[in-house]
Image: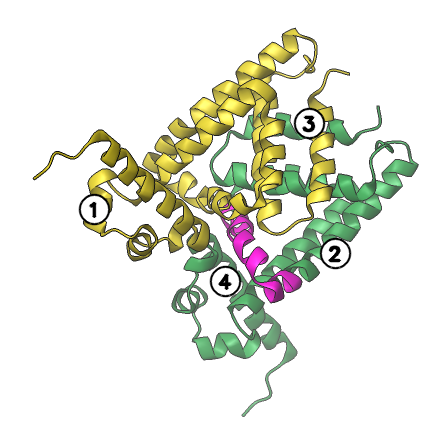
Chain colours: A yellow, B green
Amino acid sequence: MPKVSQHHLEARRRQILDGARGCFAEFGYDGATVRRLEQAIGLSRGAIFHHFRDKDTLFFELAHEDAERMADVASREGLVQVMRDMLAAPDQFDWLATRLEIARKLRHDPAFNKEWTKRSEELTAATIDRLRRQKQAGRVRDDIPSDVLQCYLDLVLDGLVAKVASGEDTQLLTAVLDLVEGSVRQR
Amino acid sequence: MPKVSQHHLEARRRQILDGARGCFAEFGYDGATVRRLEQAIGLSRGAIFHHFRDKDTLFFELAHEDAERMADVASREGLVQVMRDMLAAPDQFDWLATRLEIARKLRHDPAFNKEWTKRSEELTAATIDRLRRQKQAGRVRDDIPSDVLQCYLDLVLDGLVAKVASGEDTQLLTAVLDLVEGSVRQR
């Protein structure tokens, strides 16, 4: 048997993650059954779960990819820019809607909550770090603690996902983001 | 056969709605199957759907009850007060989390979306009407169109539901609502 190359391993992981993302986007968190994941990915459950322990591990890995990308933008341009990017790519929203579908699970399943929080830590840290820098530069209001500002922006992000996922008008949402940006700016 | 009294009819409808609300809260929108609705309500599907055509009709009636109650508070005290009331009754949030679970359905099922929008119209109208009155009284900023302010507050409401449903700290969220209130206030 030939030795599996690193390159092949990476490609296989990519195939699984991309297929899984599409499957979650189409059927939602609960609807993405193992059978549907097999179909979307084009591999057997044995092959899939050889690379990722279970469905939740797959889901967390996708959330982690999102968090990394969003943290990168948040660190350079802030969380409002992350949201503007979201608005510009509404095809991503079926996947993002799964963020809302797991709210109940986050509340009732402590182990799931812990793993999810770990995946979001990077984005939270990047946002708070940028808020601190912007405060020092006099661009973000300094009368509100950073954790409150961060929670506010993260709440707006969840609300934005809900609004776009349910088909709200993009132009109206852009005006809302302008308001949000203004509300954290130093007056 | 004795004639069914109006009082009996009302009591039966109430029994069905209360049971259904608990069932949606516990199992989510998709998880509230007809079998579980029967168990939670304590009536057969025949009896239930004699009063409400189907599961969606039940769900919309519950949403309509919410919208009426929220519109009443929004009209007198504003949508931020509706959110403060929500924060004070976190046991309601398992039910409210169903609002998030239907986002995908709202986007992909036009008939469902139309019915849902109809149920929310009352709350939207009450919010916009109060914003206009507050603008005239100089208490709400007049540099932002009312539909943008209304969309903003409604987005924050969805975000708040997501945050509480996933177990976010109530004190932090109270501080966030103070920030939200300040951001629509006339400076």
Subunit of label 4: B
Q: What residue is disc 4 on?
A: B20
Q: What residue is disc 1 on?
A: A47
Q: Residues within 10 Å of mark 2 (few under 14, many from 20)?
A: some
Q: Main secondary structure of the magenta part?
A: helix
Q: Residue at x 69, y 53 (%)?
A: B69
Asked if both marks, 3 and 2, belong to the same chain, the answer given is yes
Magenta residues, start to end: B92-115
Q: Is residue B149 left or right of residue A168?
A: right
Q: Amino acid at mark 4?
A: Ala
Dot 2: element: helix
Distance, label 4 to label 2, CA atoms, is 22 Å
Between B150 and A63, the one lying in front of the other is A63
Q: What residue is disc 3 on?
A: B178
Distance, label 3 to label 2, CA atoms, is 25 Å
Q: Is residue B38 left or right of residue B74?
A: left
Q: What residue is disc 2 on?
A: B122
- Label 4 or label 3, whichever lies nearer to me, is 3
